[in-house]
Amino acid sequence: MEELIEQAKKGDKNAFSQLIKNIENDLYWIAKTRIKNDDDIGDVLQETIYKCYKNIKKLRENSYFKTWIVKILINECNYIYKKNCKKCISYEDKEIENYLDSDFEWRNEENIENLDFYILIDGLSYEEKLILTLYYYSEYTTKEISKITKINENTIKSKLNRAKIKIKKKIEKGEIEYGKL
């Protein structure tokens, strides 16, 4: 990937295209956590790719390419979201008071293939969906998520654990049948 990034920085359109193909699925699902309308998601992805292409030469550290493009994507999603709603609350305005521990690790459970990730996170807040998507689906570390969202890493850990507890409670209440989705 490093070589593709270097080629893209030098203006190689095919290298840039390959970079986007490598992460396009991740970008779509991250956008889907914030934007529900597929037309808006398409607009967000198009604008993100355009801005990335236009500014890739400014990327200082090639190893942060994916983090960088996800930041652009999140900013574009927030712009569309705010444009489409009358009153929005930014995830940056909220804090979680307590750090919650949970031994519930649904990432490692058997039959994870049978779970529809997006049914699991349905009903969670935007920031919880975003953090879970970045952590489990895109496999970012809590430190990387902290850089992307500009939220303290310990707060990311708290929100991650709180969201897992909410999902566990939904499964325990029978709102979601584990392995039957």
Image (cartoon, rainbow, N blue to C red):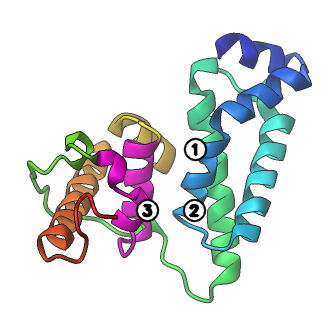
Q: CA distance from mark 2 to mark 3?
A: 9 Å
**Residue at x 65%, y 13% (from the top left corner):** 2
Residue 152 appearing in the image: no
Task: Look at the magenta stretch and give its main secondary structure.
Answer: helix
Q: Is residue 58 visible?
A: yes
The residue to which callout 1 is attached is 26
In terms of image quadrants, where is residue 115? bottom left
Q: Does the segment drawn in magenta span residue 93?
A: no
Amino acid type indicated by mark 1: Asp
Q: Disc 2 marks which residue?
A: 32
Q: Position of residue 130 (x, y in %)?
A: 45, 57
Calculate the distance from the C-alpha at mark 1 to the C-alpha at mark 2: 10 Å
- Going from N to C along the chain, the mark reached first, 1 or 3, is 1
Q: Tell me the quadrant of the picture where the N terminus can be found.
A: top right
Query: What secondary structure is marked by label 3?
Result: helix
Q: Label 2 is placed on what type of residue? A: Lys
Q: Which residue is mark 3?
A: 118
Q: What range is drawn magenta here?
A: 112-137
Q: Residue shown at 37%/76% (left/top)?
A: 123
